[in-house]
Amino acid sequence: MPSPAAIDRAIRSQRRFLPLELSNPVIAALVVVALVIWPVYVFPAGYPQPVTFALLLAFVCVLIKDPASVAGMIRKPEIRLIALFLVYSLVVNSIFSMFYQDPEPLRNSAYYMQVLLGCIAINYVLRTEPTAPRLLTIAILGALAVQFVTFAVSVPVQGVRATLLFENPNQLGFFGLLALAFILLLQRYTGYPAIVSALGAAVSVLFVMLSLSKGAILAGFALLFLYLLLAPIRDRRWQRLRPALLIAFPLAVIAIAVIYRDQIAMLGAVADRLAEIGASSDDSFAGRSYIRIAIWPQYLLFGAGEGLLNRWEYPREIHSMFGTLLFSYGLPGLGIVCVLLAVVWRRNPRDFIIYFVPILLYSVVHQPMRQSMMWTLLISIAHFGPVSGTRASGYARKR
């Protein structure tokens, strides 16, 4: 592993924007395409989207080219735990599918199969491509560009929650939140000028605001605050300014919202939306369907399976990742995911807190478990853990 000083010298001597040297160009291209088309929803919600097929094809290519590497990645703790959760979900959902003679629960397990295979494909690129951070950054910027072109063409109506290429506004808000986390996480490994990350982060925040998703807006604010608080800074001048920035950031956000609320319609819409917190019907215990856990506590032991919502008095999905885990997969399912989060946290505690804790805050009131990119972010944080103190456009770590 090169020293940090050697890596910095390599970055200064190589300012190319595109990573031209690829060890596995086909697999890398498929992963990039998958991330670029991530926001493109062609089929109705609940069905596989183009990103699914691109990641599955990338996995097949990895399996054909290097099957031994796939077996090695399965032994990695974070991948193994995702696989364990998949197996447990298959067992639970198979039982309820047979009992009710309905394949719907198994379809949810199929999503987690896609998550596992996609994580293996992306982890392979992270392990084998020296320019993986650049590849992922370019792909995320491409996805943001696709959405921005859609925004520029359609121009959503002010005060109306935008969806752009997604099925609903919450998906757009979560996309912006994940893109923001990816851009900030990868920035110090690419060697790109700070303006590249700043533009990507600004567009990501724009989409979060356009979605008017309360969960995404609050989680995005938390992410930016944690980034200012904990992100590594090498420049001593910026280190000295950090305390002032931590105070100025929330004050500036509040001041801009108050001063320009009437002049900028989007700020007024965001402020009105946040003012509804606690007053909206869906902010209640029953509105988020948590009440199902209290009414049928017997399912907390091993789970009730995911789906078949007509079984319940309140036939709505539980709007919480943790609530869904607890009710659908019981204490074992929730325990597996909690152990997975603990493993990644121990590997890279600072980045986990900065980039994934806000995702978990969002997940308290939403159910993003079937979003492949959320798990991709978690796998990326685990991968970069041992080298989180370096900037690396040319790093290559065999893990």
Image: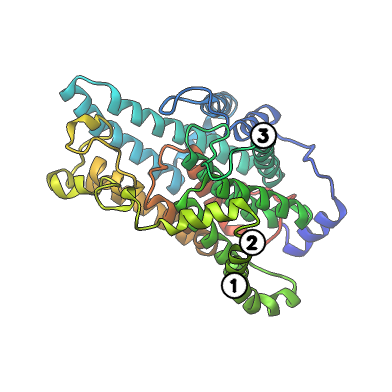
| Residue at (38, 43) in percent of width and height | 367
Location of residue 103 in the rendering, given as x and y in whole percent from the top left corner? 28, 21
State how far apart marks 3 and 1 are (Cα). 33 Å
Instruction: Note whether residue 219 is visible.
Output: no
State how far apart marks 1 and 2 are (Cα). 14 Å
Instruction: Note whether residue 92 is visible.
Output: yes
Q: Is residue 317 above or below residue 301?
A: above
Location of residue 24 in the rendering, given as x and y in whole percent from the top left corner? 68, 31
**Nearer the N terminus, badge 3 or badge 1?**
3
Task: Say if mark 1 contacts mark 2, CB within 8 Å.
Answer: no
Look at discs 1 and 2 and give the one toward the viewer: 2
Residue type for callout 2:
Tyr
Location of residue 107 in the rendering, given as x and y in whole percent from the top left corner? 34, 26
| Residue at (20, 45) in percent of width and height | 292
Q: In which quarter of the image is the N terminus?
A: bottom right
| The label number, if any, that marks residue 146 in the structure image | 3
Give 387 or 288, whichever is nearer the viewer: 288
**Label 3 Cα neighbours within 10 Å, binned few <14 / some 14-19 / many ≥20:** some
Mark 2 lies on a secondary structure that is loop
| Residue at (17, 23) in percent of width and height | 100
Location of residue 43 in the rendering, given as x and y in whole percent from the top left corner? 49, 22
| Residue at (36, 53) in percent of width and height | 339
Residue, disc 1: 251
**Nearer the N terminus, badge 2 or badge 3?**
3
Q: How is the image coloured?
A: rainbow
Q: In this view, does 59 lie above or below 72?
A: above
Give 112 or 238, whichever is nearer the viewer: 238
| The label number, if any, that marks residue 260 in the structure image | 2
**Label 2 Cα neighbours within 10 Å, binned few <14 / some 14-19 / many ≥20:** few
Task: Say if mark 2 contacts mark 3, CB within 8 Å.
Answer: no
State how far apart marks 2 and 3 are (Cα). 29 Å
